[in-house]
Image: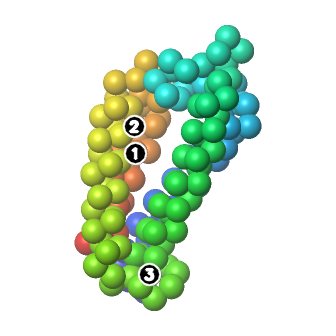
């Protein structure tokens, strides 16, 4: 087992929670104020159709990222030493770091503090998986 397996599994767990949140938004949960900077919510707290579609797509992407991290971390498959996976993990690290900065500027406390903590953790975990 690779030293990056643990961080990959933890990151995948966080990504599953985030994907679940996005699926709930796509299904019409009234949590729109805590997503997309709170600017996309309707009067009943749900997201408009195009944002719901974006949330559904985001959930799929997050699950794909989780799979990539599990591959690189050696938790599944046998391509954990792939250079392409290592580069992808570094790119994800950068994307999650940038996303953290965006979340820190959000209006809603769930997005500002909760999601910032999640994306900052994911940035660190992606770096650990990349170095792995």
Q: Position of residue 45 (x, y in %)?
A: 67, 19
| Residue closest to the far top | 43
Secondary structure found at label 1: helix
Q: Considering only order in the chain, which callout, 3 or 2, is on the residue closer to the N terminus? A: 3
- Residue 115 in the figure: left or right of residue 91: right
Measure the alpha-carbon separation of dots 2 and 3: 27 Å
Q: Which residue is mark 3?
A: 74
Could you say which is closer to the camera, residue 57 or residue 66? Answer: 57
| Residue closest to the far front | 50
Tag 1 and tag 3, C-beta contact below 8 Å: no
Q: Quadrant of the N terminus?
A: bottom left
| Residue at the image point whose x is 61% and y is 31% from the top | 50
Q: Position of residue 4 (x, y in %)?
A: 37, 74
Residue 57 visible in the snapshot: yes
Label 3, residues with CA under 10 Å away: few <14, some 14-19, many ≥20: many
Secondary structure found at label 3: loop
Vertical placement of 32 versus 52: above or below? above
| Residue at the image point whose x is 50% and y is 18% from the top | 39
Give residue 119's mark.
1
Q: Which residue is mark 2?
A: 116
Q: Considering only order in the chain, which callout, 3 or 1, is on the residue closer to the N terminus? A: 3
Secondary structure found at label 2: helix
Measure the alpha-carbon separation of dots 1 and 3: 22 Å
Quadrant assignment, res 34:
top right
Q: Position of residue 75 (x, y in %)?
A: 49, 79
Label 1, residues with CA under 10 Å away: few <14, some 14-19, many ≥20: many
Q: How is the image coloured?
A: rainbow
Could you say which is closer to the camera, residue 2 or residue 58? Answer: 58
């Amino acid at each position: 087992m690779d030293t990056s397996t643990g961080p990959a599994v933890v990151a995948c767990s966080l990504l599953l929670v985030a994907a679940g949140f996005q699926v709930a938004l796509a299904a019409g949960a009234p949590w729109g104020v805590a997503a997309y900077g709170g600017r996309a919510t309707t009067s009943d707290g749900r997201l408009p159709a195009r944002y719901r579609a974006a949330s559904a797509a985001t959930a799929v992407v997050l699950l794909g990222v989780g799979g990539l991290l599990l591959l690189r971390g050696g938790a599944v498959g046998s391509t954990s030493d792939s250079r392409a996976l290592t580069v992808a993990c570094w790119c994800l690290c950068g994307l999650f770091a940038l996303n953290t900065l965006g979340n820190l500027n959000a209006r809603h406390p769930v997005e500002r503090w909760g999601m910032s903590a999640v994306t900052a953790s994911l940035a660190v975990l992606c770096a650990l998986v990349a170095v792995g």
